[in-house]
Image: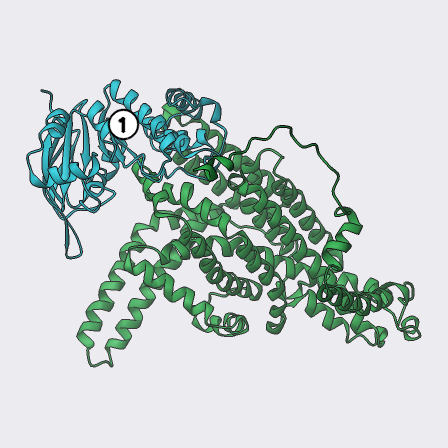
Chain colours: A cyan, B green
Amino acid sequence: MSDPIVKITGLNKWYGDFHVLRDIDLEVRKGERIVICGPSGSGKSTLIRCINALEEFQEGEIVVDGIELGPNLKHIDAVRREVGMVFQSFNLFPHLTVLDNCTLAPIWVRNIPKRDAEATAMKFLERVKIPHQANKFPGQMSGGQQQRVAIARALTMNPKVMLFDEPTSALDPEMVKEVLDTMVDLAEEGMTMLVVTHEMGFAREVANRVVFMDAGQIIEANTPNEFFASPQHARTKLFLSQILR
Amino acid sequence: MSDITASAYVRQDLLTERPAPVKTTGFIGLVRTRLLNSPTNILITIVSALLLWFTIVPSVKFLFVDAVWTGTDRTACLTENGACWPYIQAKLPQLIYGFYPEAERWRVNLTFALAAVLLVPMLVPRLPAKAINASLFFFAFPVVAFFLLHGGGISGFGLSWTAGLLQLFDDSIIGAGQVLLNLSKTSAIAPLLWVLGSLIVLVGKAIYWLIFPLTWLRDQLEASGQSVWTDFAITTAVVSLIAFALGGGVRAGWRPLAWSLATFAAIAIVIKLMGLDHGGLSVVQTRLWGGLLVTLVVSVAGIVTSLPIGIALALGRRSSIPLIRIFSIAFIEFWRGVPLITVLFFATYMLPLFLPGNFTVDGLVRALIGIALFTGAYQAENVRGGLAAIPRGQGEAAAALGLSWWKTTSLIVLPQALRHVIPNLVNSFISLFKDTSLVSIVALFDLLGSLRASFADPKWSAPSTLFTGFAFAGIIYFLFCFGMSRYSLFVEHRLNAHRRN
């Protein structure tokens, strides 16, 4: 077993008086694919947003690739450079072309010359199978294509970990498949992934581990086979019975 | 069951195209479908036509048909009821230059020409070298325009100015300490004031010795006679070295070094051309400026400075740092709550009372600062509207990619926010342009002020001169405002390419 690339210990977070995350401990090893599922409001999005400091937390510690992220959020930029994120609502920059979306961060954060950044961006756009749309604006593309651009955009920074926050929830059923295929490809190349999703098929096929959360805590974590075949906790059984019919 | 099967339908042969039933296109189509298609619309059309008839016909008649086109004084314009154009012709120099000395008016023309030469290529998107063009217009042009319009030369350069500025700063610190020391002789909390005063004076003395090498060097330069060029050489060397070092030193610093040297060479050429090192052009005080010149100087300076002020205040108002936020809110609300006339009066007559003794600011500059801050507060609220329209996800996505707050703001948030509010920004620019006419109440003669001054001339006193003059001023203001409005539509259309599918 290699060292954990993400290590979360004793993470607690409150929104005002509301205790959203309670004593979360989670270790993610290099190359591991983790699917986080649970009912809405269970804190799963909040959890992965803590990993790249989009949310601040009050107690606990997150270590990403040896960089410590305490409650005072000192090493935000260093962590964010190593962690890519894909959002539910894509969040592409609408005023920039697809290619500019993908070269912005390499140019302005990593100081890579424009020509090299464009070559890298085209490589990743080819990998998500939309190189011919490079000069379009995001608003001119379908949701599925936009989400694939968002994945390519995150990849151009060569992240060590990829976070997916419900990447297919805003998509038509037809487009869900193209995005999931891209994510499967990514998993096969050995990317470390934390995926919040309701796509249980994806969890079965790709995940090394499924983490089930409810009311801000981790209820159950297991391999997908064990998790789906024989859930232990009553809450997990109820959840699975509701989504798998 | 049979009902459902009966509703199935498959088309056998496709329909061919047919011509439109009644004429719905072209002029006749427009009249039929838009102007006369219902009793209400017929009524509105007739009323509008009458309205146009009663406004346009008399205007054309006054401005062109009945107008007097030639003449040398009022007698030509007494007989006719139309516009008195010879009056405008005779007063045109005054309307454009005010009391600017006739022999020096080529300087104003040259400034206008320079502005046009720099502005037009910047506004046409197809032309190249936008960065150089913009920096020339926004940084080099104002300085050149100042020395062209105002005249005068320079007695030093970067070194002398830095020394002078630091000395002024230090003097005011020592001055404040002295005031406290004097107060301590009479006050009830004397010891506290004395300690504080002594401390401030001590700090001032320390700074004096800290900057002593600089001031000493400046005095040596002034004594040497060739102060401008020696100072210039020193400044060039220092700034270029800093650019070289910050640009990456021997490894990658050659480009910044070359740029810095080229910039200084250009500055040297300008200094030499305009003879700034030995007095420059003869000084024309701003109280002699007038007419369109003042209108343009005030409005261009106001437009160019108010937008950065507005952006800074809008960002400040959304800042999470309480001090910056409170300052921005207070600043914006203060300037928005005060009429522009009050601001101009305050800037012109009361500001000098607050400034330290020998420190004077030119009257035109005072009005300029007042207008820039006033418009800046309005622009801040416009920009804030645009910032509020940007979804939170945009900032989050940029942050997740590792972009800092500054880069997120300048590359992602502001470009989108400003596009949303182009109409509002231009709205404020247009109202600023027209509000410049208010400077006439603080004894600056802009276009309108010069026009009103020209009415006093008995040589041209005729019934129609008043109307002619205001019609002319109206046309000039309209041309500028309409130009800005059309250009903003063009920019809006161009920048919003991403919103069209």
List the single residue furthest toward the front.
B2
Q: Nearer the viewer, residue B196 or A1?
A: A1
Residue at image position (22%, 72%) is B193
Along the line of sight, which residue is nearer the eye, B221 or B376?
Answer: B376
Left or right: where B52 falls relative to B236: right
Residue placed farthest to the left in the image?
A232
Looking at the image, which is closer to me, B249 or A55? Answer: A55
Q: Which residue is mark 1?
A: A159
Question: Could you tell me the amino acid type at mark 1?
Answer: Pro
Q: Residues within 10 Å of mark 1 (few under 14, many from 20)?
A: some
Give residue B76's position: percent from left, percent from top: 92, 70
- Position of residue B264 relative to residue B82, above or below, is above
Give the residue drawn at x 16%, y 39%: A239
In the image, residue B352 sits, relative to residue A43, either above or below, namely: below
Left or right of residue A193: residue B299: right
Task: Please provide percent x and percent y for residue B34.
Answer: 72, 56
Closer-to-camera residue (A162/B149): A162
Residue at mark 1: chain? A
Q: Quadrant of residue A53?
A: top left
Picture quarter with the N terminus of chain B: top left
Residue B220, position in %: x, y?
A: 43, 47
Q: Secondary structure at mark 1?
A: loop
Does residue A178 show up? yes
User: Residue B32 appears in which quarter of the rendering?
Assistant: bottom right
Residue A86: image location, x then y, percent: 31, 34
Left or right placement of residue A26 versus residue A53 in this view: left
User: Going 58% across and 41% down the picture, which residue do you hit?
Assistant: B494
Residue A9 visible (yes or no): no
